[in-house]
Amino acid sequence: MGAMVFTGGPIWTGDGGRPTALATEGGRIVAVGDLSSVRAALPGAYELVDLAGRLLVPGLHDAHVHPVQGALERLRCDLSHLADRAAYLAAVAAYPADRPWVTGGGWSMSAFPGGLPRREDLDAVAPDRPVFLPNRDHHSAWVNSAALRAAGIDAGTPDPRNGRIERSADGTPSGVLHEAAMDLVTPLLPADTEADYDRALAEAQRYLFSLGVTGWQDAIVGSYAGSRDQFGTYTRAAASGALRARVAGALWWDRDRGLDQLEALLERRRTEGRFVTRTVKIMQDGVAENFTAAMLDPYVGKDFCGTSNVDPALLGSYVSTLDAAGFAVHFHAIGDRAVRECLDAVAASGNTQRHHIAHLHVVDPADVPRFAALDVTANIQSLWATHHEQNDTLCVPFFGPERTAHQYPFGAILRAGGRLAAGSDWPVSTPDPWPAIHVAVHRTEPPGSAESAWPSAQTPMLPEQALTLEQALRAYTAGSAYVSHLDAEIGTLTPGKAADLVVLDRNPFEPGAALHDTRADLVFVHGALVHEH
């Protein structure tokens, strides 16, 4: 790679430095400091990159994302950019008639009474072919009568373990399948080809680069909710050189099995190259909107507390074994009981790895200091930490006032000495880091978002849990690189590290600067330009 010198604007190194220039050569950062010292580090010719007042930052790293799945949905019946029932049904009706199934997804629960769409709506626009559409959080799917018939699901079908079939008063399936109930249908979906997944990964990489995301942790490498196993997709792309991003894969833990799957996980471990797999993903609970998030106390007005997907009595032994085998665990935990179960499991293990817990919708205050005490990273999806319709109508009424005050305690975890990483959970929500950074700092909906017109959207949600811009950006760079075991290569602008760099279109640290619509003007991976706005 040719040598370059970046100067003429602020440089955020992520490690406290405030240099005025940075030099790269051969895909590496070779010097950081003032312009004269940086020039002196380059013996030959170099290209001068004028920042023109714009901020230079490390490449952002998404610590929890599903890019292949996100790109596939963009290429199919994509509902993620739509906002209401009528628009969803119009998109289903317009889906190409030569496709045997309607697949894709991305609908919002807030578009339907009680968060539950009906099969009859889909039947009206797609009467003759099955429809399977996961919602934005991918913990539920909307299906029509043809899909239910194809799977043999009727009033007499029992709910599977760790799943629920939504039903009408007479017991007839109403059109929504939660959690493991989706797997009653997913084996019937048209098989994706290797070429489909290769195209999807290429599109996801292009899209993420355009947002300044130069690497990520894929939060499920395995089969889940109709998404096929993409391990081979990543290994092919890494071998061919098509994978230019730095990717960590979290290998999927089958929640219906036990330690018998360890050998297969070890066979998939990769510790070098563009695709590494030193982490295992355990989904300990579901989501609050469908009452599968595991809570310490019952939901208000309900007689149940949600679902622990892995028996807590066994979780500790699983984590201990994975830890001893050299795997970090990437936990999904939404409810306060699930968070505690994950922390307890780490406490019972040798705790020698970089374990982290994602989402953290509700955390009991007693567990906040345990993140630092146990050295467990909080993997935050900060975009969700606002007053928006789905949370205000489908979650808060069932939390009650005490639990409502325990939502997304990012600031408290950090003040107690904990570490943060940050991610998007795309396609659950946008992979653009800057709306999420806006929420982390302001705890309000970003201007112009689909939820920004909700009456309380501009009222900060628990403002004492806000982060500074510095803290939020550090979570999206060094914090995320750490949980992906890539911090020796990326995360800060330090001599010797890879030249994964982003020139933003502004300096967001300037007083009054908008955060939500910050853009990446120039994006470099290992010193090579991969995106120019």
Image (spheres, helix red, strand yellow):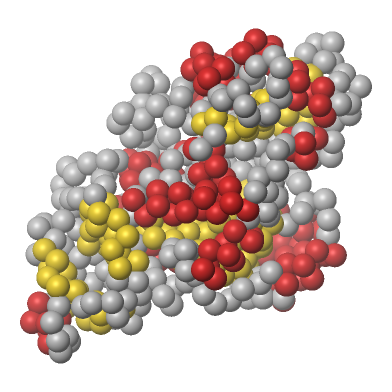
Q: How many marks?
A: 0
Q: Residue 309: in sight, yes or no?
A: yes
Closest to the observer, 171 or 284: 171
> Relative to 453, is 408 above or below?
below
> Between 362 and 171, which is closer to the camera in this rendering?
171
**Residue in view at x 41 percent, y 75 percent:** 489
Furthest residue toward front: 98
Please determine whether, in this image, residue 2 is positioned above or below residue 106.
below
x then y, percent, for residue 335: 64, 42
In the image, residue 290 above or below residue 334? above
The residue located at (39%, 71%) in the rendering is 490
Q: Residue at x 84, y 11 (%)?
A: 170
> Residue sitting at 35 percent across and 75 percent down?
498
Camera-side residue of 297 and 316: 316
**Looking at the image, can residue 356 be seen?**
no
Q: Position of residue 288 (x, y in %)?
A: 63, 34
